């Protein structure tokens, strides 16, 4: 298939899925509205109001500030080029050491296996 036909099939499948989903949603909504008139419920009871201490960071004293600071550190590194901490110099040095190790390995005289008699 060429790209034009492929995209047409994908868009058609998405449109079909959206259409089926919208139809099913509307059918369920209509059925729920129709049945809601038949349901008799008891009146709701009053619920107690909670007068608790509300934490300033949401879910704990320690984790909120740590995640907040870590988030902004990662954002600043992304904006100002924090990916440069690795650098290309380290990669070149590693490649050079790796090349020398293989040269050294291949230039050593080979040891003959002991003959078995």
Image: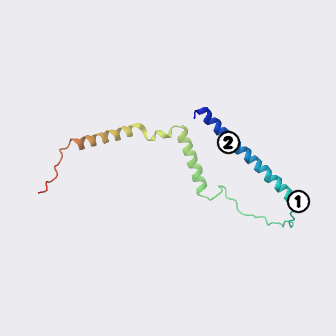
Q: Residues within 10 Å of mark 1 (few under 14, many from 20)?
A: few
Tell me the distance, in whole angstroms, between the alpha carbons under discs 2 and 1.
Answer: 36 Å
* Vertical comparison of 50 with 109: above or below: below
Query: From this viewpoint, which residue is outermost toward the left?
Result: 117
Nearer the observer, 17 or 89: 17
Residue assigned mark 2:
14
Q: Position of residue 59 (x, y in %)?
A: 64, 58
Counting labels gives 2
* Contact, mark 2 vs mark 1 (Cβ under 8 Å): no
* 39 left or right of 62 in image: right
Quarter of the image holding residue 2? top right
Q: Quadrant of the N terminus?
A: top right
- Residue 37 tag number: 1
Q: Residue at x 80, y 51 (%)?
A: 27
Q: Nearer the viewer, residue 100 or 86?
A: 100
Q: Is residue 67 above or below residue 95?
A: below
Q: Residue at x 35, y 41 (%)?
A: 94
Across and down, in percent, residue 63 comes to: 59, 56
**Relative to 15, is 47 on the left or the right?**
right
Residue at figure coordinates x 86%, y 56% from the top left: 34
Disc number at residue 46? none
Secondary element type, mark 2: helix
Of 76 and 99, the residue lying toward us: 99
* Colour theme: rainbow
Assign the C terminus to one quadrant of the image: bottom left
Q: Position of residue 47 (x, y in %)?
A: 80, 66
Task: Estimate the x, y position of residue 106 in percent, counting from the top left.
Answer: 23, 42
């Amino acid at each position: 298939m060429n790209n034009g036909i492929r995209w047409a099939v994908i868009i058609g499948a998405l449109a079909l899925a959206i259409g089926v989903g919208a139809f099913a949603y509307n059918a369920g909504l209509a059925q729920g509205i129709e049945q809601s008139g038949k349901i008799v419920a008891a009146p709701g009871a009053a619920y107690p109001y909670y007068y608790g201490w509300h934490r300033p960071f949401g879910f704990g004293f320690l984790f909120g500030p740590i995640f907040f600071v870590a988030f902004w550190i990662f954002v600043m590194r992304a904006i100002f080029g924090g990916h440069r901490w690795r650098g290309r110099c380290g990669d070149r040095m590693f490649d050079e050491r790796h090349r020398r190790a293989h040269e050294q390995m291949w230039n050593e005289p080979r040891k003959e296996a002991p003959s078995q008699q």
